[in-house]
Amino acid sequence: MDKTAKTPRARAPRWMRIAFGVSLALNLAVAGMLVGTFARFGGPPSRASSSINYAMPYMRALPRETQRDIFRAMRDQLPAESGGRQARRALYAEMIEALKADPFEPARVQSILELQNTTAVAVQSAAHTAWLDRVSAMSFEDRIAYAGAVSEVMRHGKRKKDKPGKD
């Protein structure tokens, strides 16, 4: 039998083991926060909800068909110069090109921003009018129920399974 001398295993320095432990703890903390957030709020927002604003609870509290009616009425009220969704996308494409331009032209960027602002105000105004027309047509009892639905959305958000069907 050949007796070979066992060489002692090299151990990582103490500071490296501490750094590894801290790194592992931080990674687990971040993973725990993500899991907790997804469990509480239902995961990352969908692409459609990325434009959430102050009016979203009012819309989300309405039945799906009523929401569609309001969006249809809103589109009908938009002035022709707002140009629709494709025109708004074209403005973003134009802004991207303006940002890439060399030399940079602040006046061009300002002009695009002003057009985008005008369009956004027109869309928002049309949305306000369409929503207010719909709410004004509600009976007192319907408005009370709607106010309760808005309160519920504000408290808990609206889960997909809770969305009401057509009117």
Image (tube, helix red, strand yellow):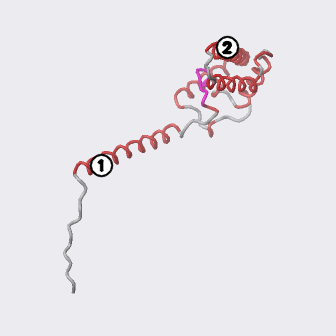
Label 1 or label 2, whichever comes before in sequence order: 1
Q: Quadrant of residue 58?
A: top right
Residue at the image point whose x is 70% and y is 31% from the top: 64
Q: Nearer the viewer, residue 22 or 12?
A: 12
Is 43 magenta? The answer is: no
Which of the image's four quarters has the N terminus?
A: bottom left
Q: CA distance from mark 1 to mark 2?
A: 54 Å
Q: Residues within 10 Å of mark 2 (few under 14, many from 20)?
A: few
Question: Circle 2 sits on which residue?
Answer: 111
Question: Circle 1 sits on which residue?
Answer: 21
Residue at the image point whose x is 23% and y is 61% from the top: 10
- Label 2: state its secondary structure: helix
Q: Looking at the picture, which amino acid does disc 1 mark?
A: Gly
Residue 138 in view, yes or no: no
**Is 15 left, or right, of 56 in this rendering?**
left
Residue range (magenta):
50-57
Up the image or down, 88 lies above or below 47; here it is above
Task: Give the tally of numbered discs.
Answer: 2
Q: Quadrant of residue 133?
A: top right
Residue extending furthest toward the bottom = 1
Residue at the image point whose x is 31% and y is 49% from the top: 20
**Percent position of residue 25, x then y:** 33, 46
**Is 106 left, or right, of 125 in this rendering?**
left
**Percent position of residue 159, x then y:** 59, 37
**Is 69 left, or right, of 158 in this rendering?**
right
Select label 1 or label 2 by which is in front: 2
Q: Looking at the picture, which amino acid does disc 2 mark?
A: Ser
Up the image or down, 101 lies above or below 161; here it is above
Q: Quadrant of residue 101?
A: top right
